[in-house]
Image: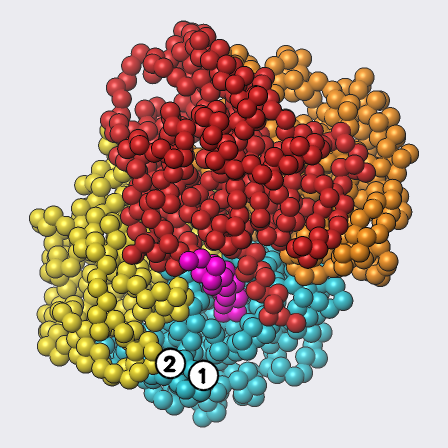
Chain colours: A red, B orange, C yellow, D cyan
Amino acid sequence: MSTFGKLFRVTTYGESHCKSVGCIVDGVPPGMSLTEADIQPQLTRRRPGQSKLSTPRDEKDRVEIQSGTEFGKTLGTPIAMMIKNEDQRPHDYSDMDKFPRPSHADFTYSEKYGIKASSGGGRASARETIGRVASGAIAEKFLAQNSNVEIVAFVTQIGEIKMNRDSFDPEFQHLLNTITREKVDSMGPIRCPDASVAGLMVKEIEKYRGNKDSIGGVVTCVVRNLPTGLGEPCFDKLEAMLAHAMLSIPASKGFEIGSGFQGVSVPGSKHNDPFYFEKETNRLRTKTNNSGGVQGGISNGENIYFSVPFKSVATISQEQKTATYDGEEGILAAKGRHDPAVTPRAIPIVEAMTALVLADALLIQKARDFSRSVVH
Amino acid sequence: MSTFGKLFRVTTYGESHCKSVGCIVDGVPPGMSLTEADIQPQLTRRRPGQSKLSTPRDEKDRVEIQSGTEFGKTLGTPIAMMIKNEDQRPHDYSDMDKFPRPSHADFTYSEKYGIKASSGGGRASARETIGRVASGAIAEKFLAQNSNVEIVAFVTQIGEIKMNRDSFDPEFQHLLNTITREKVDSMGPIRCPDASVAGLMVKEIEKYRGNKDSIGGVVTCVVRNLPTGLGEPCFDKLEAMLAHAMLSIPASKGFEIGSGFQGVSVPGSKHNDPFYFEKETNRLRTKTNNSGGVQGGISNGENIYFSVPFKSVATISQEQKTATYDGEEGILAAKGRHDPAVTPRAIPIVEAMTALVLADALLIQKARDFSRSVVH
Amino acid sequence: MSTFGKLFRVTTYGESHCKSVGCIVDGVPPGMSLTEADIQPQLTRRRPGQSKLSTPRDEKDRVEIQSGTEFGKTLGTPIAMMIKNEDQRPHDYSDMDKFPRPSHADFTYSEKYGIKASSGGGRASARETIGRVASGAIAEKFLAQNSNVEIVAFVTQIGEIKMNRDSFDPEFQHLLNTITREKVDSMGPIRCPDASVAGLMVKEIEKYRGNKDSIGGVVTCVVRNLPTGLGEPCFDKLEAMLAHAMLSIPASKGFEIGSGFQGVSVPGSKHNDPFYFEKETNRLRTKTNNSGGVQGGISNGENIYFSVPFKSVATISQEQKTATYDGEEGILAAKGRHDPAVTPRAIPIVEAMTALVLADALLIQKARDFSRSVVH
Amino acid sequence: MSTFGKLFRVTTYGESHCKSVGCIVDGVPPGMSLTEADIQPQLTRRRPGQSKLSTPRDEKDRVEIQSGTEFGKTLGTPIAMMIKNEDQRPHDYSDMDKFPRPSHADFTYSEKYGIKASSGGGRASARETIGRVASGAIAEKFLAQNSNVEIVAFVTQIGEIKMNRDSFDPEFQHLLNTITREKVDSMGPIRCPDASVAGLMVKEIEKYRGNKDSIGGVVTCVVRNLPTGLGEPCFDKLEAMLAHAMLSIPASKGFEIGSGFQGVSVPGSKHNDPFYFEKETNRLRTKTNNSGGVQGGISNGENIYFSVPFKSVATISQEQKTATYDGEEGILAAKGRHDPAVTPRAIPIVEAMTALVLADALLIQKARDFSRSVVH
C-alpha cells in the first residue's frame, strides 16, 4: 500500500503524468516550526541534474504545504504536501508501448492491475519518491530537535568502482563518525565523499553513457546520535523496518546493516562488540561497531549504518531483443536520453526513508518508556 | 511488535524460560485439512541436533493445536499453537549476569525495558522463532494447494567457504529450478546442497568449535510457482516485505534479492531480463532472471530467490574483555557448550517467514483481482 | 489517526483555514471509470444551503482529482483529491478566543496538542468531512458495480419530532426497502422522507434558530443488496466497523443497528428472525429483519440499517456563562449566524462512511472466498 | 480479525469445543507486578452462575500465564494466557444441526467460511470473550497504576425494567461519580445498583425463563480519573474506538456516549457543558457532563460514560418455525436449559473492552505528549 509507519505515518500519491504528486504526513509533533523552506532542499537534491544544497535556483518540484501548519508552526494535524507535475498529459501510445520494458515494472503492473497505462508504470518510477522525500524532511527535523540525530547517505560504489566500506576498518568507522551532507555534496553530483574514487566513478558512468547503457551502485547511510531502545521485537526490529523501507525504494535490490554479508566470515571473537564505560557521557559504549548500532533489533546508541545496492537502470537506449505484450519477438530501443546511473540521486530518498523509520520508532519507544515509568 | 501480516497474520509469544512458546495464526483458509503432522516436520528441522526430515524421533518441541480446527479441517477461525518449554524456571542470577553479553540483546533489552531478566533476553533468542516456524508451515500448505508453490532454503556460505550463488551463472539458475528440501537434508546437518563444498563447511565449523569461537554464514532461498501480481506498491513491495521478514530473524544482518549486491556492477544491457513467449504455458517469461522474480515490487512469475547473511553467534565460551552493566571492566566467558554455527538451523525459519509473506500477499492480490473483475 | 480502512483505505487532511482539504484513496479497483462528475454530487449535497442533487450550480467545494486516473479510468494507484479552501487565512485572535467553546473541541485539542490555533479546532469541524465524502463516492461506485449496492441515509428525528423508525413495524421495513436518495432530496433540505413529519421538523429548527439556539437529530441509513459474508470476527465485526465509522463523524453520539436500544425489551421469541427459502433468488432469507442485516458480525444478505444521533450544535450565538482557558469566569456569545441544525447535512457523510466500511469489508471477504476455494 | 489495538494489542483465539481459549497481549508495560491473581477475578465474574468477586470457589476457567512474566513481574514481552476448555469434543451432528439457529451466527458463518461446524459458530459464542476479559484485566491494572483509572459497568435495563440513566439528572451523575464494582456485585447476579429496580429485573428474567424465552438489557459503563488528551482525530476518536469495541461484543446492538439518543432533543443552550475553574485540582472542569467525557473525539478529564444494548438471547428452547440450511420448513427447539438473560454477564466484558481501548489510547497519547515536548 501507499502508507508507511504507525504513529508517524506517511501516505503518498502520484505518478508521472497526473496533476501532482505528494503526500499526507500524520502524527507530526505539534508546535514545531515548519515551512516549505524545511522541505525544499531535499526535494531539490532529488531532482535530476541538481548537485548542491546551496543553489536551488531551479524552480521545479516546488513543494506547497496544504494543511497542518499555521503561522509557521505545526498544529499536530496531518500535513499535506503537493508538488505539481510539469507534464500532466498521459502520452500517446506509440509503437514502443507494445513492449513491456525488460526489468521495468510494465509487465508486472499489467499483470497486477490489468492496465497498460502510461501513468501506471509511473507509480513504479522515480517520481513516486517525491512524497517520500518531502515527508522525510519533516521526520528529520523532528529527530534533529529530539537529540540532534544526523542522517547522512553517500555513494560508496558505482559499477566496479568502490570506496572503502569495510566495517572492520577504523578509517571507515572514522568516516561514519564525521561525514556530513555538506562534504557529500561538495564532491559534486557523484556524491561520493572519497575524492580519489569519486573521479573514477564519474568516468565509469560516462563509459556506460557512451554505450547507451547503464550501471548500478551502492548507497551507504549512517545515523548518528540516535537514542537507545528504538525498535520493537520481534517482527518490527529496527533493522527489519529499515530493510523494509530500503527495499521499497525503486531499483534497490538489497540491504545490509553493520558488517552485513562481509561479517559472516569473521568469527564471533572478532565480530562481537565488547562494552566499555565512557565517562564523558556516563554510559556503556561498544569499542567496535560491527553490529551497526542494533542488537536484538533495538538501537544501542552507536552509529547505525547500512548499505543498499541499486541495480543498473532498466531503461536504456541500446537495442534490446525482447517480446511484446502479445508475445511477438522484436527489438526495443528506448527513445530519448536516459540517465545512465541514478544511484547518486537515491541519496535523499535513502535519507528520507531512514528518517521515517526512526521517527516512528522513536514515538513508539517513548510510549513504552512512559509505560514502564508508571507501573510497579 | 509480535504480529506479522495483514490478512494472513501471525502473533507469537514466548521466551526461553516461560511455560510455553507458540502463536496464533489468523486468516487461515477454512476447509483446509490440517493436523499437527503438517507442522511438526519443520519444527523438528529447527531443533538443535536434528538433521533429517524423515526421522523426527525426538519427542521434544511437540506442537499442540489449541483451536481453529475440527475433525482435521480448519474452521477459518484463529489457529493457536503451543509448544511447551522444557526448562521453565528462570535461572538464578550468577556472576555472569553482571555482564551484558557483547553483541547480544542483553544491553538493548535492558535499555528498552529497564529489565535484566533471564527470560527477557530470551525473546531475542532462537526459541522465539518456534512460533514463526509453526505458522509458516500452515502458510506453506495453503500456498502449495493454491499453485504448488515450493519454498526451499539452503546454506550457501559458512565463514569463508562459499558455494556458487552467482545469479548470472546458468548452473546456479539450474540449481534454483531443481533444488528440493530432500536434497538439502540429504547433505546432513550442514544443509548445503553442493557436496564438494559441504564437507569444507563442516570442517570450517569444527575449526571454530575447537577455538571456542563461532562463525556465520549465508542462507539462500528460492520460491517456485508463485503467481504473478503479488506485492503492493509502493511501500509494501514484495521484496520489501521479504526483507522485513528476513531482517526480523535473530542474527540476520542483510538481504539481497536476484543479483543483489553483485548486480550493481553489471550494466543494464546485460542485467535486464528480456521477455519471450513460452508456448507450453502460454505466457510471457524472461530469458534470464537477474531480477529475482520481482519487478517494480510485484512478482513476475519467475523464481523468487534471495540470500540472507547470519552473523557469527554472539555467545562464545572464549574469554571476552568487556564491561559489566555498571561499567566495570572484566572478563566474560560464557559457560557451557555453544553451537558455533547456527546458520544451518535458520533454514526452516527462512522458509517459514517467506511463506508468511507470500500467503499474505496472495490473499491481498486476490482481493485486488476480484475488484478489477467487477468494475468497468 | 487520519487513515481508515485496510485494503480500501482513505487518508484525509485539512482544516478550516489551510489551503485545501482532501484525501488519498488507496486500493481503488483498477479499470473503473471515474471522473470528478462521480464525486461532485455528494460533495454538493454536503454543502451548507444546498438541497438538491440536480442543481449543483454552486461553484464552491469543487473537487479536483490529482492522481490515479488516466483517460477517465482508474489505474489501481492512489487517487488523491483536493478541494480548495475559500478562506485560507487563519483568523486573528479576538477576545472570543480566550474562551474554549463549551462542548466544542477547543479545550481538548488544546490539551492534546498544546495549541490554541484557529485551524486546530478546524480539524474537529465539519470541513474535515469533505475528504470522507469524496472518498466515499468512489467506494459507492465500486459497490454499485459489484452488486448494485444502494446506500440511502435520511433524517428520522429533529429535536422531539420523530418519524417512525420502529424496526418491528412492517411499514418502516417497507420504507427501508424502497427509499431512494431522490425521494430524500425531494423533501427539500430537511431530508426527511415522511412529508407529514418533515414540515414539523422544519418548524422545530426555525424555533431554535429564533432563540439563537440549536437542536440535534437522528440519521437513519439503509444498505440494500449487500452480499452475505462481510465482516471479520471477532473484533472487526461489520457492525463494529460501522459503529467505529459513525462515531468518528463530528457531533455523533451513538449508533444502533437493527432493533438497537428498542429491541432489548422484545423477547427472543419475537426478536429472532426466522429463516425461509426464497425461490426467486434461490437462497435463505429471514422473514423479519430485527437483526439489521448482520448476525455474529457478518452480513446475512438482508438490508443493513442503523441510526446515528447527532447532538445539538455546540456553537450558538446565545450568551453562555463559562470560563476562559485561564480559568476566569465570563460570558461567551459566538458571533455571526450559525446553523441551528446540522443533522440534515450529515446525510452524505453517513453514506460515505458506510460505503468506506463496506468496500473494505467486501475486498477482505473476497480474499477469504478465494482462499477457501483453493484448499482442501 | 482477532487482533485489537495498536500499541497495547490483544489477539484472541478459541471456540467452544477446542482444547483451550486464550490470548496474547502485546505491549504490556515492563516491570509491572502481574500474576494469575490479577486476572482471575474478572474471569470468574464472567462465568455463568457466578456473582461475587470475593468467592471464586469455582475451579473452572482457570487462567494460566504462559509467557511474559518472571518472578511475578512483566518483562515487556507478549503475555500469553490460556484457559482450558472443559468440553473439548466437537459434538456429533444431530437433527437440530440441520437448522441454522434464527438470529444466531450459524447461517452467516456458513456463508462466510463454507463450514457448518459445531465449533465454527462457537467463535461467535460467549466463550470467545474469555481472552478479552483476561487481557482487559492487564490493561486495567496499567490504567489504575497510571492515574487510578476506575472502570465500572452495571446493568441499567432488563426488558422493560429500567433504572434511571438520564444524563441530565444530577442523581444519575452522582451515581456515576460513586458507583463501585463492590456495590454492583453486592446486588447479586443481576448487577443493577438500584435496589428498587434490581428485584423487578430479576422477576422480569424469571418470567421469560418460565416461557422458555429470553430477554435483553442495557449495560452502562463509567470511567473515572482518565487523563485529558486521549483519542486520535479524526477516524480514531476515543468514542469511535469505544463504539468499535462495544459493537464487537457478541449480542450488542448499539452504543451511546453521554446524552446519546436522548440528547438530540435537548437544545445546545442546555446541552453544552460550560467550563469552570476548579481550584482544588487547578484545572478547567465542566459544570455538566452531557458530552460523556469526550469533545472532538478527545477525553476532557470528566467521567466517560456510555451505554450498550444487548439483544435477547437468540437460543431459546421455545419452538421456532424456521427453515433448514437446505431451505425446508421445520420446527426448531433448542435442547437443554438456556440462560434467558446474559446482559449481567456482559459486565466484565464491557469493562475489559473499555480498558483495552483506553490503555492503547493512553500509550499513543503519551507518544504525542513526548513529541510536542521536544520540538520548537
Indicate the position of residue A332 as horizontal and vertical percent values. 39, 10
Residue at 22%, 82% (x, y): give it.
C331
Mark 1 crowd level (few <14, some 14–19, many ≥20, 10 Å Cα)? few
Where residue B346 appears, as percent x and y from the top left, is 72, 36
Q: Give the side of residue D59 with respect to residue C135, left or right.
A: right
The circle drawn on residue D281 is 1
Mark 2 and mark 1: Cα distance apart in space: 9 Å
Q: Nearer the viewer, residue D174 or A2?
A: A2
The overriding secondary structure of the stretch rendered in magenta is: helix
Q: Quadrant of residue A319?
A: top left
- Describe residue A146's horizontal placement relative to residue B369 as left or right: right
Q: What residue lies at 22% left-to-right and 41% top-to-bottom?
A: C64
Mark linked to residue D268 = none
Instruction: Give the chain of mark 1.
Output: D
- Residue type at mark 1 is Thr
Instruction: Describe the element under mark 2 as helix, strand or loop.
Output: strand
Q: Position of residue D250 (x, y in %)?
A: 49, 65
> What secondary structure is marked by label 1?
loop
Query: Over which residues does the magenta segment extend?
Result: D354-376
Q: Can residue D26 be seen here?
A: yes
Q: Which residue lies at the image location 32% right of the left edge and 24% below the top edge?
A: A118
Residue D210 percent location from the top left of the image = 49, 81
Residue name at image x 73 percent, y 31 percent:
A264
Image quadrant where one finds the N terminus of chain A: top left
Is A121 placed left or right of C58 in the picture?
A: right
Query: Which residue corresponds to mark 2?
Result: D285
Nearest the eye: B278 or C327:
C327
Q: Amino acid at mark 2?
A: Arg
Specify the farthest residue to the right. Answer: B210
